[in-house]
Amino acid sequence: MIGGRRTVLYAGGGLVFGICFLFMLYYGKETFYVEGTETLSKEYDYHVVLLVEETGNEYWRMIEKHAQQTAEEHDIYLESIGPEKADRGEMLRTMDQMIAAEVDGILTQGLPGPRFRELVEKAEDKGIPVLTVDSDRPDSERRAYIGTDNVEAGRLAGEEMLRATEGRQRVGIITGNLESLNQQERIRGFEEAVAGRDRVEVVDVRESNISEVGAAEAAYTMIKQHSDINALFGTSALDGIGMVQGVEDITVGERPFMLAFDILPETMTLIEEGRLDATIAQYPEQMGKKGIEVMIDVLENGYTEPLQHTKTKVIRQGDVAS
Ligand code: BGC
């Protein structure tokens, strides 16, 4: 009798254990199976690196998104890396590591200073082509530059200021970083466009460190120091947005004429609301797409046109809706 009960007990226990085991297998797979892990072993044609100035920056995220899409269409494994906040030293170290890892190609912002040139040479010696995007470094061995013609973009800003203003303009320029070639070129283009017109004069140039807060502070101090500033030009993507904050904190009455750079959603809203006058559009999505296409060209044919400019254009209030 006792033996029979024990058998039932064991059978029941065994059944419960069996059911639990099956559940564990099923839900364990559902929980721990990471979808897409099979892609890790997928064979790619090339491993390309995109080295960006700031991973947290919306402008760079647009370049990255379109480069990624194009890379996927062409069976390229694209690794996008860079510092969270602009840090040139970190970018150079990462570039060196990527060369050591013998990736197939490097797409990077062109950086100032001798180390960048050395690294491009080192990469080329190892057969790793380097392309610059967004900012060029024509005195290096990079194969091509894909991005805005920055002198032309600066010129467009200068012409827009001449077109849209009357009378004496005392201009404050807020720039991402004075060492970056793209920022220097935008300022040069602007100065060339207004040269010879006595009514427009640049009275101060300050850096924002490509941050919104930096641009707000720069605008605030500039206006405090030069009470006659009546026009501002911000030369990198977050400068216009920051400038508006700085200006709205300090000005009573008529605000300065304000030109920004890039078409981030917030910039477009400020233009629509009449809090910025115009912006110079760059097309980061084209830079990302074309960057990968040019890289394929170089990897497969060994040559490409060294200068591949993407579009640039003035955007005013009337253009925002479209
Ligand atoms: C420039 C980039 C820069 C970004 C910063 C853009 O206008 O082309 O070089 O990293 O602004 O927000």
Image (cartoon, grey):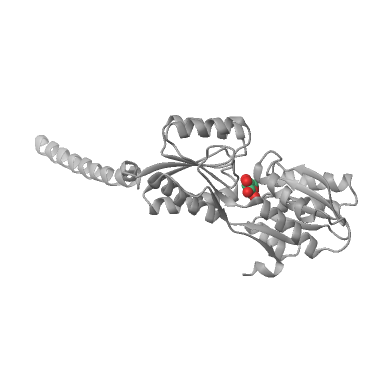
At horizontal 90% and vertical 52% (from top left) the residue drawn is: 228
Residue 98 visible in image: no
Tell me residue 298's x, y (percent). 43, 46
Where residue 229 appears, as percent x and y from the top left, is: 86, 52
Q: Is residue 30 visible?
A: yes
Point out residue 289 in the picture as x, y percentages from the top left corner.
48, 54
Locate residue 230: give its quadrant. bottom right
Q: Is residue 105 above or below residue 276?
A: above
Q: Please report the residue visible at 11 percent of the width from the left and 35 percent of the height from the top.
A: 2
Q: Nearer the viewer, residue 247 or 137?
A: 137
Examine the rendered structure and indicate whether residue 152 appears above or below residue 87.
Answer: below
Quarter occupied by the C terminus: bottom right
Q: Compared with residue 158, is residue 316 higher up or lower down, i.e. above or below?
A: below
Q: Is residue 47 left or right of residue 90?
A: left
* Residue situated in front as seen by the camera: 269 or 186: 186
Point out the image quarter for the N terminus.
top left
Where's residue 199, x and y in %?
87, 57
Looking at the image, how many numbered discs can be counted on the residues?
0
Q: Residue at x 45, y 31 (%)?
A: 125
Residue nearest the observer in this picture, 152 or 40: 152
Q: Relative to the observer, which residue lies in front, 244 or 100? A: 100
